[in-house]
Image (cartoon, rainbow, N blue to C red):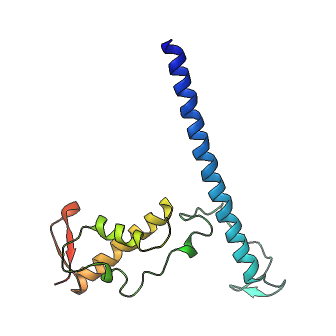
Amino acid sequence: MSNLRTARLAIEAEIAHAKKGAAYYMERVSSLEQALAQLSSAGEVAPGVKTNGKAAGTPAKTRGPKRRRVEAGEAGQLPSTAGDYWQNLIDEQPKSGADILAAAVNGLGFTPTRAQVGKLRNRMAFALKALVQSGAVKDSGSGRARRYFRA
């Protein structure tokens, strides 16, 4: 009987995995369709019009496909983090980088993808370093124990 139970559990796990995969690809299709719609609404370049010094339709010499870290359509969904975006997330109470990132994700108004969270994390790392160097924000501790706060 244990073999039947094991087989049943394995099949149920495979079904759950397949459902997650299908949901991922549906989200991917939706994202790609949105990117295509944005490109269509932006208009197409007329033949013979120069873009970046080359005539439209002239194939660029490449060594292979360029890899992108962010899926098509995802970059436009993230808000601008320029100016005092990160500084506004920091107050007098010391906060870790993870706390600041969580506050940024909660303030988005939508659930970001893993790639978007990674992009926000990279933006935050550079911004916090610049804020500490400029003196706008103080820090204490080191490594994962580092806390950021306003003086």
Position of the C terminus, as image quadrant, is: bottom left
Dividing the picture into quadrants, the one containing residue 139 is: bottom left
Q: Above or below — where is 124 with respect to 22? A: below
What x and y, as percent, mark residue 127? Answer: 34, 78
- Foreground: 61 or 100? 100
Name the residue furthest top: 1
Image quadrant in which you'd find residue 122: bottom left
| Among the 4 quarters of the image, the one containing residue 129 | bottom left
x, y (%) of residue 94?
Answer: 19, 73
Q: Give left or right: position of 107 versus 89.
A: right
Q: Residue at x 30, y 82 (%)?
A: 87
At which x and y percent is residue 145? 19, 62
Residue 121 placement, left or right of 111: left
Image vertical order of residue 63 relative to residue 104, above or below:
above
* Residue farthest along the right direction in this orientation: 47
Residue drawn 57% across and 69% down?
74
Q: Please name the residue shown 18% across and 75% down the image.
A: 93
Residue displayed at 30% across by 81% down: 130
Q: Relative to residue 143, is residue 149 depicted above or below?
A: below
Total count of labels: 0
For the residue pair 130 and 85, the one nearer the viewer reads as: 85
* Location of residue 136 with respect to 60 vertically, above or below: below
